Image (tube, coloured by chain):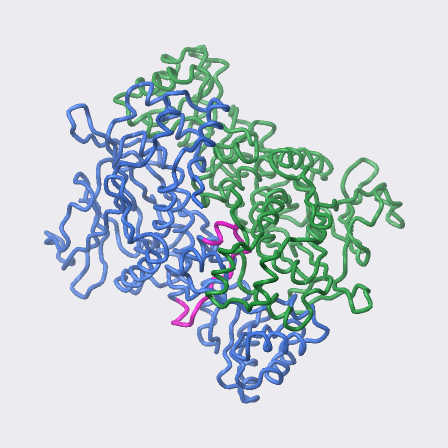
Chain colours: A blue, B green
Amino acid sequence: MTESSALRTDRYELTMVDAAIQSGTADRECMFEAFARRLPDGRRYGVLAGTGRLLEQIRRFRFTDAELAWLRDEHVVRQPTLDWLADYRFSGNIWGYQEGEIYFPGSPLLLVDATFAEGVVLETIILSVLNYDTSVASAAARMVSVGRGRPIAEMGSRRTSEHAAVAAARAAYIAGFAATSNLEAGRTWGVPTMGTAAHSFTLLHDTEEEAFQAQIDAVGPDTTLLVDTYDIARGIERAVRVAGTELGSIRIDSGDLPTVVAAARAQLDDLGAVNTKITVTSDLDEYAIAALAAVPVDAYGVGTSVVTGSGSPAAGMVYKLVAHKDDAGAWVPVAKTSASKESVGGRKDAVRGIDAGGIARREIVVVGQGPAATDDGDEPGADAEIAGERQLLVPLVTGGEIDERYLGAEGTRRAREHHATAMAELPVQAFRLGRGDPVIPTVYR
Amino acid sequence: MTESSALRTDRYELTMVDAAIQSGTADRECMFEAFARRLPDGRRYGVLAGTGRLLEQIRRFRFTDAELAWLRDEHVVRQPTLDWLADYRFSGNIWGYQEGEIYFPGSPLLLVDATFAEGVVLETIILSVLNYDTSVASAAARMVSVGRGRPIAEMGSRRTSEHAAVAAARAAYIAGFAATSNLEAGRTWGVPTMGTAAHSFTLLHDTEEEAFQAQIDAVGPDTTLLVDTYDIARGIERAVRVAGTELGSIRIDSGDLPTVVAAARAQLDDLGAVNTKITVTSDLDEYAIAALAAVPVDAYGVGTSVVTGSGSPAAGMVYKLVAHKDDAGAWVPVAKTSASKESVGGRKDAVRGIDAGGIARREIVVVGQGPAATDDGDEPGADAEIAGERQLLVPLVTGGEIDERYLGAEGTRRAREHHATAMAELPVQAFRLGRGDPVIPTVYR
């Protein structure tokens, strides 16, 4: 299954290559940069996700006969460009923040060093993958941080498109979710999968008891019974009668949760099902989860809000040419000067300034040197608050060779671990849900 | 390329099949219904999209050896269920609102008549496709209606995940957009594609003139030059100098658009480029487009807002069991009674009540008879305002056979035409942008 990803691309990427081949500029060495000018409204940090998926997409970015024939028939580009596309393999270098990393406005999240033509054709696929996955991970991290260690499962596959669902499950897992309902995310990315039952299963049976019995017969009492199809109190009574006090969990998907959950806990305890857990799943988001902190919930299931970025369904990342080499081989910084959409030209490096207590204090963007040129642990210079610096850019693709450690289930697990480490550095103010400024400033050096 | 869609599914769909096979209820004939309890906040109508894509996904919903091996290894379901999945082909009936149709709260948008097991395994894929595509089409239709006939291009591929981008381009086209930047949408669904150039192309060249010249050399003067990389007035002057007064169009992507566009129009006219069009593309949504009604814009490009449903990125559709047959073969209506999530049980039909002037006045949901049982043009009975009724449900799948007319580019074109017809029936109040109630009431009969 090596479906080409090459036409998941804006037409202008190819017509720009066409024009650049015509004008002789296609082979100029360029540095492109993906970054976000700002965080979503009122957020204090963002979480980069999608890198592992992106690297797979870049690997599949091939113009096969089928793509070339369509481009020819549609007169999208001319023959020299078709020939160039036929041979297309990305042969440049890519550096990026590690997947799962925290970011701030202006963080140089991905740096692509390639000819203009090689770099520009990847623009759409880079932004599609990173914008969506990052929006999900950024929302998910906030839910995890207010979840106080209670496991959260991603259940939103039905609230985003069918492929995005798989990406969302992966991004939420990277940001600390415990599991997903999406089977393809399990198969492709190694995310643990889980599931309960739907109301339709109860309604299919002539009585609620029969439905519960069928589920217990199939998977044993250590399952989750959905108890709110008719009446929650009667549902719980029937659930424990059928499953016994060994019942693993009940799920509640409706009602005023603080009240309903407290009553359910008391009822379960009265019935002797003191170890039966309570999972809630009704239109939860980070605010609803925070409001349930003092309620005896054991696990959350989150759908719509996480897969749609909880109000910010696209991370707002852009991909800009920041430098190209002149004929003498020297890098020339470039930037547009359009009103309210300024960029900082030039090749970047980035480090996180850490204080003596191990807490992040600055996002430091180093302009003018190449990526990953700043030593880890550089002396902080004049900034007395900063005791050390952590290098943020890692090589992802070198001379066209993808670093395999970032791919597949291994890459996903690695990203999840990196995320947990990076989150531990954030100042506590980062975890306030209310609107605010980025928790650390971005400074240019 | 017949990639299986079968694991883009919530785990519980399969474990419910497993339990139902165990309990002997898997083969009960059921009617499932997809509907939305409400429209997105303040919207006056919704636009159904995704049907053609969904039918392709159902065709590809096959458990091949690869899927079965993974499910076995993960112990998701037991052997009898694996055997059943291996043979899975949807063999039931599906009716639906035609793609592109307008809908209201409670409209029975998709009806699936099949055994419990056959119907329940499609739940996730049905909702994933319909919720996303419908959210895009519903937003797009509002933009088209305030666009006063000016063409709108969908350019949001980079603001949604890479497969969703293709679906979004298709859904926006169904809702009346003129074109998309997404090449795969052109290839797969026959959506017209278009493109201009990015700021990076200008920045690549040593001067703006050289960039413009390269683009003109490649595609001729009937192209769109992006004039706001440095200074818009100078950009326009250079564009006309290089391309001549035959220049097709300029694109402006920044600045205070009413002011900037008026100045650009005056400048183009002064330069003699009276036929050169102006395309604007800066973070537009339906409100921004409405605000530009009196400004001499010729075409719009819309990105983020359309592909993310303009604030409502998931349509909120649910898929519920509404009836099953009892052992005697009679249909038994079922519905859960959970707080604030009630459903109306029973098999539905639906017609739109039209007044003597051809304007829609009621969404009439007929409960208790099967789908498409109500005659087109039924006598309206006691409702004096209604002069006629239009049947809303069409057969999409009959005994497992998909109606081919709804697939591919033909189905997409058909949906676009149907949408235009259905929109023409709406009362004028539907086109107000401000928040309000559904423009016609849903009544149950």
Q: In which quarter of the image is residue A147?
A: bottom left
Q: In which quarter of the image is residue B319?
A: bottom right
Does residue B331 lie above or below B414 as drawn?
Answer: below
Q: Give the range drawn in magenta.
A: A146-166
Quadrant where the C terminus of chain A sits is top left
Q: In this view, does A45 lie to the left or right of A4?
A: left
Q: In this view, does A250 lie to the left or right of B211?
A: right
Q: In this view, does B130 lie to the left or right of B238?
A: right
Give the number of callouts: 0
Q: Where is residue A29 in the image (x, y as percent from the top left)?
A: 24, 30
Q: Position of residue B351 (x, y in %)?
A: 78, 47
Does residue B397 lie above or below B172 as drawn?
Answer: below
Does residue A340 lie above or below A102 as drawn?
Answer: above
Residue sitting at x 82%, y 40%:
B355
Q: Position of residue A247 (x, y in %)?
A: 54, 81
- Residue closest to the eye, A110 or A435: A110
Q: Position of residue B304 (x, y in %)?
A: 47, 41
- Residue closest to the eye, A166 or A70: A70
Q: Is residue A270 magenta?
A: no
Q: In this view, does B379 lie to the left or right of A169?
A: right
Q: Is residue A157 magenta?
A: yes
Residue sitting at x 30%, y 57%:
A439
Residue sitting at x 19%, y 55%:
A390
Is there any visible trace of residue B91 in the rendered image?
yes
Is there any visible trace of residue A434 in the rendered image?
no
- Residue closest to the eye, B115 or A157: B115
Does residue B21 lie above or below A273 as drawn?
Answer: above
- Residue closest to the eye, B91 or B288: B91
